[in-house]
Amino acid sequence: MRSALPGLLLLLALPAGAQIYKYLDANGNPVFSSHPRERGRGKVELPPPSIVIPPPRPPEAARHGEQSGKIDYSRLELTGIADGESLRANDGSFAVEVAIGPGLRPGHSLRLLLDGQPYGQPGYATRLELVNVERGEHSLAVEVLAGEDALQRSAALRFTVQRVHRRR
């Protein structure tokens, strides 16, 4: 039975290498088939498949150093908002950018800290959205995480959110 399994798998893979033909049906719509037609037949030439080679893994010592927090980012700061700034955000929504250098390493993620508390889910994007932030004074920082462990934190910025208050 074991000797038949590779042969069976090879037979299943044969249709994947079959030729593809294109023709137009009676209404002029393109149709793709594995069987040629006499009228309007034409072979479809497919480009070769793309091969993606993952980057080499760093040596074990370097991976251990990153996870233990021994490697620091030379630049980690929030931009798009100035320290002490007043923001006019009627719905309490605005975005900030994270300037990080060198780029975010594999296995690391970014998370905002609003008033010292985690805000949102960790992610890889350097443009981060805040939604429905209450009016008043706040602090905002960003931290780099390796899994659940905080590796590095930016300086906190203080800002004030100004929202329109409607009387009913």
Image (cartoon, helix red, strand yellow):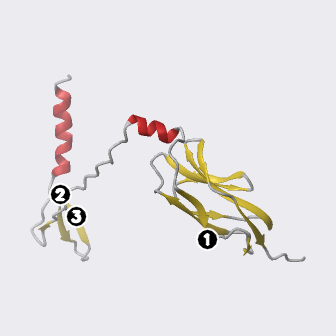
Quarter location, residue 58: top left
Residue 35 percent location from the top left of the image: 15, 59
Residue 9 on image: x %, y %:
21, 36
Label 3 crowd bin: few (<14), some (14–19), many (20+), radius 10 Å: some
Residues 1 and 162: in front is 162
Q: Quadrant of residue 2?
A: top left
Determine whether label 2 and label 1 are within 8 Å by CB: no
Instruction: Tell me what residue is drawn at x 19 percent, y 58 percent.
Output: 48
Instruction: Give the mark count.
Output: 3
- SS at mark 3 in the image: strand
Amino acid at pointer 2: Ser
Q: What residue appears at the point 53 percent right and 38 percent down from the top-left corner?
A: 68
Residue named by callout 2: 34
Residue sitting nearer the eye, 123 or 143 = 143
Residue 100 percent across, percent down from the top left = 52, 59
**Spatial distance from mark 3 to mark 2, Cα to Cα?**
7 Å
Task: Name the kind of residue labelled 1 in the image.
Answer: Gly
How much space separates mark 2 and mark 1, taking CA atoms?
55 Å
Q: Rounded to the nearest whole Å, what is the CA distance between mark 3 and mark 1?
A: 51 Å
Mark closer to the observer (3, 1): 1
Q: Nearer the viewer, residue 149 or 165?
A: 149
Q: First in sequence: mark 3 or mark 1?
A: 3
Identity of the residue drawn at 80% across and 77% down: 164
Tag 1 residue: 80
Q: Assign a secondary structure to mark 2.
A: loop
Residue 32, numbered circle: 3
